[in-house]
Amino acid sequence: MNKSLSTFLSILITLLTPTFLVLLGIRILLTPIFPEVEYRTPNFPPDSYGFTQEERIHWAKNAIEYLNNDAEPEFLGDLTFDDGSPFYKESEVSHMLDVKILIQVAMKIWAWSLFLLILLGAWAKLGKWEQVYLSGAKRGGYLILSITVALGLIAAIDFWAFFAKFHEIFFEGESWIFLYSDTLIRLFPMRLWRDAFLMEGLIVIGGALFLAFGLKPAPLNPPISKNRNGEKA
C-alpha cells in the first residue's frame, strides 16, 4: 500500500472511531433500560404534578419508542389524560418530531460508521495493513478522550449553560423550552439530562481509554537493526 493511501485510511479511521463511540452512547441511552434505571436512582426528584414513578417510566419508554420507530407525530399527539385533555401540547409534539428527525439521522450515521469500520477492518486484515488500522483507531481514542474531557469540564462548571448551548445548536429558537408543568419536563427533568450526559461521557471515555491505551499497534516504521560491524541486518 502506498504512503498517501495509508495516510488517508489512517485519518479516516481516526475520524470514524469517535463518531461511532459518541453515537453508540446515544444509542444505548435510547433503550428502555435507561429510564428503568434512572427513575429508580436514589433521590431522583418526584413529579410534583402527580406522575407516579411507574407512570413516568411507562411514558418515558413510550417517548423513547417514538424516537426509534417510524410513527407519525400522532403517536404522541393523540395521547390524552384521563379527563380527555391532551397529554402533550402541540409545541411538545413538534419538538419531539424535531428530536426524532435528529436522532434518526444520527442513528444512520452510527450505522454507517460501524459498517465502514468493519469493512475497513476486514480489508486491513486481508490487505496486511492492520497496524495502520490500529494506529488510526488508537489516535481516534486519544482524540475523543480529549474532546470528552474538555466538554465534561465545561459542563461541570455550569451544566445549564452547557445544556442550553447544546439545544441552541441543534434546535431553532426557544422551541425546546417548556414549563415545569408540561409533560416533557415532568417526564424528563434536568436531573435526568444531567445523568444522561454523565452516562454518555462514561461510555465514550470507557471506549476511548480502551482504544488509546489498550491497543498496541507495532511501529509503522520499525528501527533497522545492525550487526556488530554497523551493517544493516
Image (tube, rainbow, N blue to C red):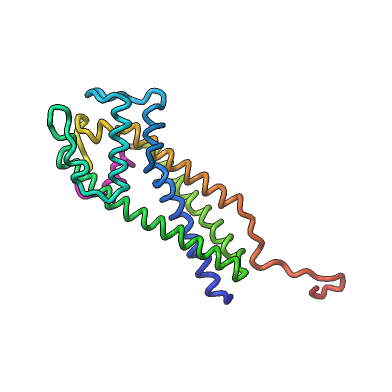
- In this rendering, is residue 199 above or below 41? below
Region of the chain picked out in magenta, as a range: 160-174
x, y percentage for residue 42? 41, 24
Q: Main secondary structure of the magenta part?
A: helix
Report the number of numbered marks: 0
Say whether residue 175 is visible: no
The quarter of the picture where residue 76 lies is top left
- In this rendering, is residue 122 above or below 56? below
Task: Give the residue drawn at x 18%, y 45%.
Answer: 74
x, y percentage for residue 150? 44, 46
Horizontal side, residue 48 vs residue 139: left or right: left
For the C terminus, give its image quadrant.
Answer: bottom right
Horizontal side, residue 222 vs residue 79: left or right: right
Q: Is 168 one of the magenta-colored residues?
A: yes
Task: Give the residue drawn at x 72%, y 67%.
Answer: 223
- In this rendering, is residue 52 above or below 208? above
For the N terminus, give its image quadrant.
Answer: bottom right
